[in-house]
Image: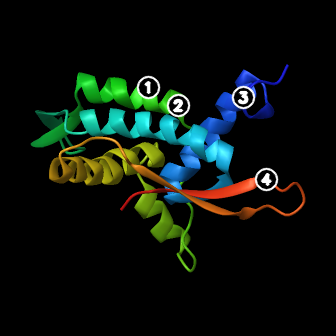
Amino acid sequence: MPGKLGVTSTQRKTMLRNLASDLLWYGKITTTLARAKELRSYVEKIITLAVNSYTDTISETVTVKDEKGKETTKKVFKDGAKKLAARRKIMTLTHDIPDAKQPGEKNADYKARVKGIKHPLMEKLFNEIAPKFADRAEQLGQGGGYTRIYRLNNRRGDDAEMAIIELVD
């Protein structure tokens, strides 16, 4: 039996995961007003998790041997417990979006750009979105309010109320 948004709970959760992933990746999406309102709280919780834990990193000095047997020391940065838990939680709430090849970009350049990035959406969330909103929260003295909804004209065909939901700059 359909529930909220006219679909079953598993379909609704999957739809919210897809919409949240697209919103975090592209920064703005167009959908129905009801979906946008439901998506707002879902995405705000994801961003809050990232903002509260993005600075939790641990640096270690590791000794590495190369092919010739020469030892070198490297400084390695790893996620702390809080950031790792947040990453895993967010990965259950979103789908991973592969980084697309840019127009006119050569295969070698694309492979070099995405080398070592296993989860591009997580990297974008923790390296770009979370620091931006943490600075914003510090300046304004408040958390939350990461998204904005604009109402649009009704959709032709079924007359559904449409809206644009976007991340606040």
Secondary structure of the residue carrying tag 2 is: helix
Q: Residue furthest top?
A: 1
**Who's the residue at 35% across and 32% down the image?**
49
Q: Is residue 97 visible?
A: no
Contact flag, marks 4 and 3 (Cβ < 8 Å): no
Q: Which residue is mark 1?
A: 89
The residues bearing labels 3 and 2 have C-alpha atoms spaced at a distance of 18 Å
- Residue 48 in the image: state x and y as whole percent: 34, 36
CB of mark 4 within 8 Å of CB of mark 1? no
- Can residue 66 be seen by looking at this rendering? yes
Q: Amino acid at mark 1?
A: Lys
Residue 88: % across, % down: 42, 26
In the rendered structure, which disc, 4 or 2, sits on the residue that comes first in sequence? Answer: 2
Residue under pointer 4: 160
- Helix, strand or loop under label 3: helix
**Residue annotated with mark 2:** 93
Quick check: 11 left or right of 39?
A: right
Foreground: disc 3 or disc 2: 3
Which three-letter amino acid code belongs to the residue tagged 3? Lys
Frontmost of labels 4 and 1 is 4
Q: Position of residue 110 (x, y in %)?
A: 49, 66
Mark 3 crowdedness (10 Å alpha carbons): few <14, some 14-19, many ≥20: few
Q: Residues within 10 Å of mark 2 (few under 14, many from 20)?
A: many
Crowd rating for badge 1 (residues with CA inside 10 Å; few <14, some 14–19, many 20+): some
Between the residue at mark 1 and the residue at mark 3, the CA separation in whole angstroms equals 23 Å
- Measured in 3D between alpha carbons, the distance from the residue under mark 4 to the one under mark 1, in whole angstroms, is 33 Å
Against 121, residue 50 (above or below) is above
Which residue sits at x=28%, y=30%? 83
Give the residue number, with chain letter if any, for mark 3. 4
| Cβ atoms under marks 4 and 2 closer than 8 Å | no
